[in-house]
Amino acid sequence: MSEATQVSVAEDEAGQRLDRWFKRRFPDMTHGRLEKLLRTGQIRVDGGRAKAGLRLETGQTIRVPPLSPPAEPAAPRPVPEHEAQALRRMVLYRDDAMIVLAKPPGLAVQGGTHTTRHLDGMLDALRFDSAERPRLVHRLDKDTSGALLLARTAAAAAALTAAFRRHDIRKAYWALVVGVPDVAQGRISAPLSKLPGRHGERMVVDEEDGRDAVTDYRVVETVGERMAWLELEPRTGRTHQLRAHCALLGTPIAGDGKYGGATAFIPGDAIETRLHLHARAILVPNPRGKAVVVTAPLPPHMAEAFRFFGLNERDAGDPFTHGE
């Protein structure tokens, strides 16, 4: 490609982050080069400067500077019937505009260099009666379980993406953390930026160049001084935000060696070593009536930990009713 080109965002690309869009079409482009092209204004969206995390909308025009030829978007692989049935059993809620899934831990939401099995590649199994393929409008880490929102149409994807941008959509998470926060309820406000490393990127507090990251939290219950059950509500949507913020409190999420090191693991066989972070509920406003609130059941390893420590799910009360 010797000249800059203008590329329109297709319907099935609505809701994607700009950096993900480039990674799919230009897999050889490094993140550092992409950031430089964005910073210098060589990449633009609808004529304006843009950031890597911008959520794209159908029909937007992306200026692509001279690069190697774009790769054709990979066609989704056929979904085996047993996987399709398993995926349909994950559905917690469905209407004309959206689907909420109970994502299990260990299932990646999107593909990557070493990830060939992922939710994004199986969404054809969730068309149901729709002519359009569902699309992602937010993400969960591979090891995080819980409520995941999908849009069923391009129009719904644009509306839900805008609602996320306005912070109208709310998410409540449950986490089991090692230790007990000094303050039982509060707000963590600590900007985060990505730090590359041998074992992948991790988020670190960066007061100068980090992006704003805000999390509300409260302690629901404690297990002596050993552990605590936290309810978390992110007010921003940074990568690994809850994991980094819990570690900043001095109480890493159980099983999160990336941010807590050895202190994130309970000695012995009391609970599994998997990440104990769960997207418990999501609230989606409905302009025509009452907001939709969907809760996701605990995954087996967290349900077992709750039983082991004598924690009762009912003690948390209804989501989104605290601290208002």
Image (spheres, rainbow, N blue to C red):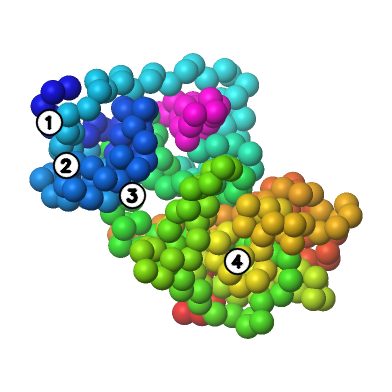
Q: Is mark 3 on a helix, strand or loop?
A: loop
Choose between 96 and 75: the one closer to the eye. 75
Q: Name the residue under label 3.
A: 53
Q: Which amino acid does label 2 sit on?
A: Gln
Residue 182 part of the magenta-drawn span: no
Q: Where is residue 291 in the image (x, y as percent from the top left)?
A: 41, 61
Quarter of the rendering containing residue 267: bottom right
Q: How far apart are marks 4 and 2 (CA)?
A: 37 Å
Residue in the image at 55% along x and 37% along y: 108
Q: How far apart are marks 3 and 2 (CA)?
A: 16 Å
**279 over 19 or under it: above or below:** below
Q: Name the residue under label 2.
A: 42
Q: What residue type is labelled 4?
A: Cys
Q: What residue type is labelled 3?
A: Gly
Q: Name the residue under label 4.
A: 246
Q: What element carries label 1?
A: loop
Instruction: Give the label, 4 or 2, closer to the camera.
Output: 2
Q: Are marks 1 and 2 in contact (CB under 8 Å)?
A: yes
Q: Do the residues labelled 3 and 2 touch (CB within 8 Å)?
A: no
Q: Is mark 4 on a helix, strand or loop?
A: helix
